[in-house]
Image (cartoon, helix red, strand yellow):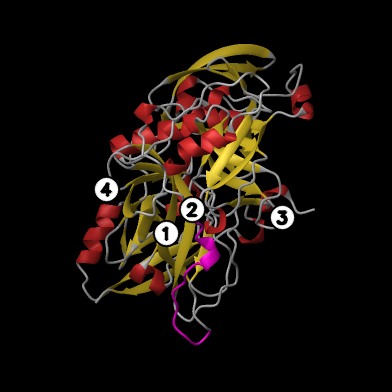
Amino acid sequence: MLPISRKFTLISTGIFAAGAMAGAAAGWSAPHWFHGTRAMPAALQSSAAGNATSPIAAGAAPNYRAIVAENRAAVVGIEVTGDVKGGAGPPFRFGPFGYDPFGGGDNDPFFRFFRNIPGPSNRVPTRSLGSGFIVSPDGLVLTNTHVVHGAKEVMVTLSDHREFRAKVLGADQPSDVAVLKIDAHDLPTVHLGNSDRLQVEDYVLAIGEPFGLEETATAGIVSAKARSLPGDGYVPFIQTDAAVNPGNSGGPLFDASGAVVGINSQIYSNSGGYQGVSFAIPINLADQAEDQIVKTGKVEHGKLGVEVQTVDQSLAASFKLKAPGGALVSKVEPGSAAARAGLKSGDVILKYDGTAVTDAGALSMRVNTTAPGSDATLDVWRDGRPLTLTARIESATRTAGGNEQTPEPDNATLGLTLRPLTQDERDQAGVSGGLMVEDANGRGAEAGVQPGDVVLAVNGTPVKSVSQLRTLTEQHQRGVALLIARGDNRLYVPVQLG
């Protein structure tokens, strides 16, 4: 059996438009059978008219026909065009807090569906398919971040076959939630439910476009709640057995009343296709992300500033706990919220704001969904005795000094998306500055710069901020030499600008 970390698969479907070994990249169009006949709904009704079906008695089967009829017009298809680096190599992946299109190797937990794609040029055009759903009559659409990441163009297709070019208002990688905006009005919308009320064995129904097959509905039950997946400690996934496949990414998961309770995101699979285990992002979490993206264009996540591990039976005995459970603190970051609260290595966090911490993943999920600046009560076990501490949660996108760590494009000249290194990253690398490359396109990628590289200097001048890098590159019209840290190696990469 393959290790669990190799089986979790993002469920957007990618079509690589690569030409022959000696030819140019070619376009792609779906086979005729991808385009099912869509019945035009009798009317496009807004959520004000009520999209949810009437509540059903406990244990009774839901009216799936009514749920589909009332919501199908609000489910959309998403087509994304972009490009990726050509040639054979590792698969794409998403990490829990960053995108690394060239890292991970065979042990990566997140897999795309095409590997070792030949390509004659440095970058190869791609087209991928996903799903989404309309949440406001004026054109707000929810989907997954991995559906639209790196997109040059995003097209949204409605159930009546109208197509709109969408703007990505924001895409949050930790939650895998993205918000799109299309220029349309009086659109049908879904009704958002309360994912906290879901229980194991509740009925659920998914609508989306697996493999580009329009308006596909599948049903199942809730198999488990608050699943923490390998490599993703932020999202408390809803596990279901509703069949979802590549192309379902970003589509809605409905409860028995017809309200959206999740966004379909991943599957557990040996083959890349559905094998009975699917995962959805709780809509309560997605709704919080949407609110922040609409207001500010990004999502602020909470940070406590600790490294923790789950307390098993052996550790419980060592720390004089009656039963396994909680999050054992192995490291406290200096100057962090945890340090200011008085947490120490060896403490076991048993409750967070009154809610039991079952394992390290549960703590991570609770902290990350806490608004920065909020106070959190920590019930701690220290030296065989209970202790209560209060921590003021800080922003995960800021260092202790308050500098923004959000990735941003440097400019159109280099084509790199960078962020300043955190203090921990600087300490580990033994440098005083530097910029982490989150994504590489354009001239920077053509020169060989890769995501995961650290830009230390431009033409010998150390860099500490993206604005400084912009200024230095603008002073050299023909080209610059970037000093790159890649693992333990240092190398200069010449980038031609003119």
Give me the C-alpha separation between circle 1 and circle 2.
8 Å
Element marked by disc 1: strand
> Which residue, given by chain and number where applicable, does mark 1 sit on?
80
Q: Which residue does the image show at 61% across and 29% down from the upper left?
A: 62
Dot 3 falls on a residue whose secondary structure is: loop
Q: Which residue is mark 3?
A: 270
Q: Position of residue 301 (x, y in %)?
A: 43, 34
In the rendered image, residue 32 lying in the magenta stretch gets the answer yes
Q: Is residue 102 visible?
A: no
- Residue topped by disc 2: 130
Residue under label 4: 183
Residue for point 63% across, 39% down:
219
Q: Nearer the viewer, mark 1 or mark 3?
A: 1
- Provide the residue span drawn in magenta: 21-37
Name the foreground residue: 86 vs 278.
Answer: 278
Of mark 3 and mark 4, the one earlier in the sequence is 4
Residue type at the position of mark 2: Gly
Q: Amino acid at mark 4?
A: Asp
